[in-house]
Amino acid sequence: MSVDAVLAVRRPDGPPLTAEEIGSALGFRNGPAERTRHGATGPDGSRLSLWLSTDPGDLSGPAVGVIRDDWYAERLYDGRLYVGVTESAGEDVVAALRSYCRFATARLHGTLGDLETASYVDVDGNYSYRVDRPALPEAVVDLRLGSEAAPAAPGFSLVEAANRAASGTGLVFTEDEPGRHVIPSEGAGDSVTYTVAHRAEELPFARGARSGAVPVDARLLGEFTERLLTELAGTTSGADLACWVNDRLHRYEVELSPPA
């Protein structure tokens, strides 16, 4: 069975992203960015096939934080990137796809800024998500970590890892209850919120950390979460990381894997 992933990207404010902007940020070099099969090498060494679409009929994605009575809320994104593995560097194709989507998400946000992205692997439909929040005069950051396996490093502390990653941002974390922000999955209004809630029901978050209120801007927050993800991927196995800013979901990553 073919396993593929999808990454949707949008600019919430300002003109919609063009295919050329998305393709340039991702390093496309051969032919038009859209409707051309592009090759890439993933962070784990897997060979990938990429296909970008900005067709208006192909751009629906989760409207995070919006609630509808009849179905999960959706909105239009600016582009959808389809990712397939043509040659896997290991046995876990799903991990290779998630690893590339995480890499592509970082490239898009780091290059273009002020974006919203959502990605999933079709074999399970579990969403990872990131949105760039505007500069905030006062922000409280909440972190939750859940893992199918014990941390590989003895004495692992989410608070200590978060404070190392937060160096220079003004954020200082202390321990917090793991269950904060978790809602029943039947109350979820969109696919991302459902993923967070459903996976927390199957395997509750094991650790929580909460910062004091400090001024935060999108760039520093994005750099902080990237550093934290890198550290956690090396010390946990199969971990989910959730991050809320002022009680609004900022980032959710499904099943971190060790760096290649």
Image (cartoon, grey):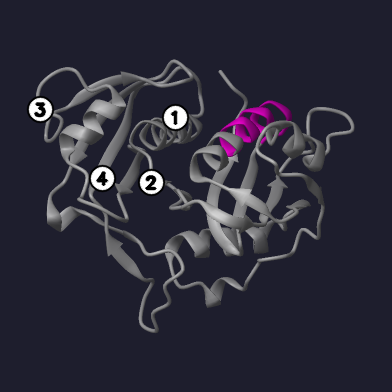
> Residue 39's image quarter?
top left
Q: Are marks 3 and 2 in contact (CB under 8 Å)?
A: no
Tell which tag, 1 or 2, sits nearer the viewer.
2
Q: Which residues are magenta?
A: 225-237
Which comes before the other along the chain, label 4 or label 1?
4
Image vertical order of residue 44 relative to residue 14, above or below: above
Kind of residue indicated by mark 3: Pro
Residue under label 3? 32
* C-alpha span from label 4 to label 2: 17 Å
Which comes before the other along the chain, label 1 or label 3?
3
Q: Main secondary structure of the magenta part?
A: helix
Q: Residue at x 14, y 57 (%)?
A: 57
Q: Are marks 4 and 2 in contact (CB under 8 Å)?
A: no
Secondary structure found at label 4: strand
Kind of residue indicated by mark 1: Phe
Residue under label 2? 114
Q: Is residue 130 left or right of residue 209?
A: left
Q: Quadrant of the N terminus?
A: top left
Which comes before the other along the chain, label 1 or label 2?
1
In the image, residue 205 lies at what x, y percent? 72, 55
* C-alpha span from label 3 to label 2: 24 Å
Q: Residue at x 45, y 73 (%)?
A: 189
Residue under label 4? 80
Give yes or no for residue 120 being in the magenta stretch: no
Q: Residue furthest bottom?
A: 69
Which comes before the other along the chain, label 4 or label 3?
3
Secondary structure found at label 3: loop
* C-alpha span from label 1 to label 3: 22 Å
* C-alpha span from label 4 to label 3: 15 Å
Which comes before the other along the chain, label 4 or label 2?
4
